[in-house]
Amino acid sequence: MPNPESWLCWKAGCSDELPVRFGGGWAETYTKMVQRAALPPYVDCLFVQQEGFHRPSDFTPLMNAIEEKTGIPIALEGVFKWVAFLASKRDARVPVPNQYFGAFQDGTLKYRGIELRRRDTTLWVRKIQLKALEVLAGANTPHEFADRIPDGMALVEGARRELGTGRVPLDELIVRQKLSRTLDGYKSPSPAARAALQLQSKGRQLAPGQSMEFLFARNASGVHAWELDETLDPGRLDTKRYFRLLDRAIQTLLDPCRQLIIPDILF
């Protein structure tokens, strides 16, 4: 099992990671082999780490043992060359099994629970985070991974310059959030509620559960509802707020990598 404070695991130095997907049920018991080799499962997926397992065929005896013990059919989705788990917000020493990103042996990416998967993440942030992940996906060793981080940071700096000079289409910066209550029920209106108030002033009727689209803006309310008739002047865009959103998404990728030798400036 990985070091409790290091959630970036490698083919070199430790074993490969493997998601095993359960078909139609939840395994209530595991064989001793599974108990010794596996990280905690989530929903219908099990991550397994076992020294000496490198090829898909290496996992066949383990999968057969699980099926025999549980009676539940399983299938191998793939073998990671590296995978990083995000730390729990409650306890940084504990990884969150359903928040991770990694690269399979063929370089294909898989990710769950990060900004790329969230509907409230702007298209611009998702695109940059994906590009940064694609840069890291080519790494095969910890040294290669560390070497690729400056390339990823250069990509981020380029994205920040594009935003700062008005070269990012406004529709890539739309934020989507749902109204959690009626507008008069907010003591401190959320950005979505403030956008809804703008539309309400134009005669729109809005209800809890509706999804609001807006831009972060440098105005009295801090937002500009996307559905307003008037288009936001790009010069009034709150670029600092978008920079923070981008930085948070990139930090998601860097946090599990702190055990690598990375210049302090990146953090």
Image (cartoon, rainbow, N blue to C red):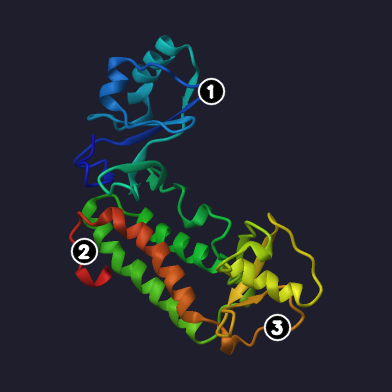
> Which quadrant of the figure has residue 206?
bottom right
Left or right of residue 103, residue 179 in this image: right
Q: Residue furthest right?
A: 203
Residue 119: horizontal and vertical position, in percent? 58, 56
Residue plotted at (20% across, 68% down): 263
Note whether 64 is above or below 101 in the view shown: above
Left or right of residue 106, residue 3 in this image: left
Image quarter of the C terminus: bottom left
Q: Which residue is mark 1?
A: 23
Residue plotted at (44% across, 69% down): 246
Note whether 104 is above or below 116 in the view shown: above
Left or right of residue 226, residue 69 in this image: left
Looking at the rendered structure, the secondary structure element under dot 3 is loop
**Three-letter code, disc 1:** Gly
Q: Which residue is mark 2?
A: 262
Residue plotted at (49% across, 81% down): 239
**Three-letter code, disc 2:** Ile
Q: Which mark is residue 231?
A: 3
Residue plotted at (35% across, 73% down): 154
**Three-letter code, disc 3:** Thr
Looking at the rendered structure, the secondary structure element under dot 1 is loop
Looking at the rendered structure, the secondary structure element under dot 2 is loop
C-alpha span from label 1 to label 2:
41 Å
Q: Nearer the viewer, residue 132 or 232?
A: 232
Residue 259: horizontal and vertical position, in percent? 20, 54
Note whether 208 is above or below 230 in the view shown: above
C-alpha span from label 3 to label 2:
42 Å
Q: Residues within 10 Å of mark 2 (few under 14, many from 20)?
A: some
Residue 98: horizontal and vertical position, in percent? 43, 41
C-alpha span from label 3 to label 1:
49 Å
Nearest-to-viewer mark from 3 and 1: 3
Going from N to C along the chain, the mark reached first, 3 or 2, is: 3
